[in-house]
Image: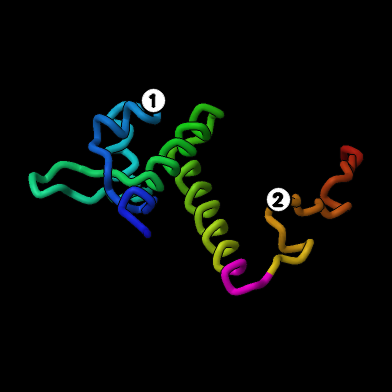
């Protein structure tokens, strides 16, 4: 039996509770909305309501910001990570498995020409 408690996209958390849960300010959550990363639903009274999925995305952005990335870059990375995870879940639902070169957990090897430094004589 599925309930709204099982649904990661159910907007269960108020802005204050959401901010407390992931250790950020309410202004930070509003900035993610302004950046277009998350769009919280609104209660009948007009208050923002966040889902667990949105809080996971916000927490990941906070982590990237703490590592020194700008907000726009962090939002883009989180968006791409989320799309990749969704695609991988969909592939698994359809009975497929990613090949070794499609596995997101395995880094793409750097081309030898790029990874080998070359030094040129000054003119």
Q: Is residue 95 magenta?
A: yes
Q: Residue under label 1, please give it.
A: 23
Q: Position of residue 27 (x, y in %)?
A: 27, 31
Q: Which residue is depicted at the point 27% across and 44% down?
A: 12
Q: Is residue 72 magenta?
A: no
Residue that sits furthest to the front in the current view: 1
Residues in magenta, as a range: 91-96
The picture quadrant where one finds residue 108 is bottom right
Q: Which residue is depicted at the point 51% across and 59% down?
A: 83
Q: Position of residue 30 (x, y in %)?
A: 27, 38
Give whichever of 117, 81 is nearer the camera: 81
Q: Image check: 41 left or right of 61? A: left
Q: Secondary structure at mark 1?
A: loop
Q: Image check: 29 left or right of 100? A: left
Q: Which mark is residue 105?
A: 2
Q: Is residue 8 above or below residue 65?
A: below
């Amino acid at each position: 039996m599925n309930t709204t408690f099982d649904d990661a996209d159910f907007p269960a958390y108020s802005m204050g509770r959401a901010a407390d849960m992931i250790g950020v300010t309410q202004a930070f959550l509003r900035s993610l909305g302004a950046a277009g990363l998350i769009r919280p639903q609104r209660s009948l009274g007009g208050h923002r309501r966040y889902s667990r999925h949105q809080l996971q995305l916000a927490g990941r952005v906070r982590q990237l910001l703490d590592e020194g990335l700008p907000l726009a870059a962090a939002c883009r990375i989180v968006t791409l990570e989320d799309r990749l995870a969704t695609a991988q879940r969909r592939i698994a639902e359809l009975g497929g498995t990613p090949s070794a070169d499609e596995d997101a957990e395995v880094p793409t090897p750097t081309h030898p020409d790029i990874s080998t430094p070359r030094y040129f004589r000054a003119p």
